[in-house]
Image: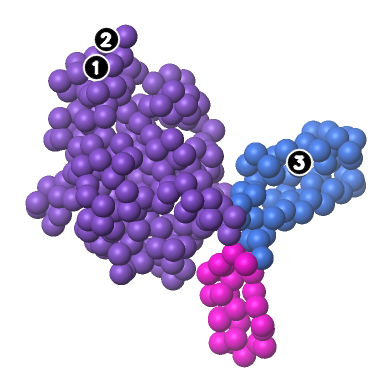
Amino acid sequence: MNAGRPSVAVLVFPGSNDDRDAALALESLGADPQLVWHADEELPQVGAVVLPGGFSYGDYLRAGAIARFSPAMRAVAEFAAEGGYVLGICNGFQVLCEAGLLPGALRPNESLSFVCRDVPLRVERNDVPLLASCAIGQRLTIPVKHGEGCFFADADLLAELDESRQIVLRYDGDNPNGSLDDIAGVVNADGNVMGLMPHPEHATDPLLGSTDGALILRALVERARERALATASS
Amino acid sequence: MKATVLVRPKPGILDPQGKAVEASLRHLGFSVDGARVGRLVDLEVEVADPEQARAEVERMCAELLANPLIESYEIELAEDS
């Protein structure tokens, strides 16, 4: 693996539709994106994994519920268990929640309307690997486009997430989906797996109105590079 | 053996679909105080023993048909007629 241009896997499920956008954004930020078909049982040698947005398996049953059984998801779970960096965007976030790699669930938007617009986010933590390039309290503008982004956790789980500081991104003054406590993004207990409803890959070029998404994706590419170097030297 | 699984949003969970149904029913002039929308799954289980079939469907619910964080489920078994 070329550590100068670290490999990042982008999973492709039937119904994914932001896989190429994610790959394009990652490439522009210095990564070597590798599209991985959901039926593949192994991941190529990569430093990080992105689960892209879309409507995997038509969102049948519940968004993300079927994708979690893909052979490639078993490999992603193993990769995450070894400390590998995994970012789930939108449908990818839903898949990670259904797979139990992230806490909580994503329910249909409170308004029942599909929302598609730029939203302001507030960064709650920057001591997690994928938000290391942001400042605490920083306001990011990143678009959302989803019908089922209303984050839910019951009272016990929410208290646990607050206590362990796993809520890392919140909508800042404009909650587009009725999400509990304005939650837009969470991490797992170890911080190496992160999911968010907004689409950083759609905010990496000034032409698209914001480049704030690059702060997250560039951090992912940096972490992938470090991991590639560590793997190469061990 | 036939089995029916009823999946419901748990009490307290926001159910915007139910809210929309309730509002529409009221709009039509029905006096409705609350509507919740769940899901029904009809299954043909390849197990004859009711106890074994129920255990099998329980596992299906836990692993796929319901998300325990947000949904409850009920299983109904029916002998083949």
Range drawn in magenta: B12-40
**According to the image, label 3 marks what residue?**
B57
Q: Which chain is purple?
A: A
Near-viewer residue (A231 or A176):
A231
SS at mark 2? Answer: helix
Q: Residue furthest front?
A: A163
Residue at x 32%, y 9% (from the top left corner): A234
Q: Which chain is blue?
A: B
**According to the image, label 1 marks what residue?**
A229
Give the chain of mark 1. A
Residue A102's spot in the image, x, y percent? Answer: 48, 42
Residue A164's spot in the image, x, y percent? Answer: 47, 46
Residue at x 39%, y 21% (from the top left corner): A43
**According to the image, label 2 marks what residue?**
A233
- Looking at the image, residue A60 sits to the left or right of residue B47; the answer is left
SS at mark 1? Answer: helix
Figure quadrant of the N terminus of chain A = top left
- Give the residue type at disc 3: Val
Marks 1, 3: nearer the viewer: 1
- Disc 2 crowd rating (10 Å Cα; few below 14, some 14-19, many 20+) is few
Residue B58 part of the magenta segment: no
Residue A122 seen in the figure: yes
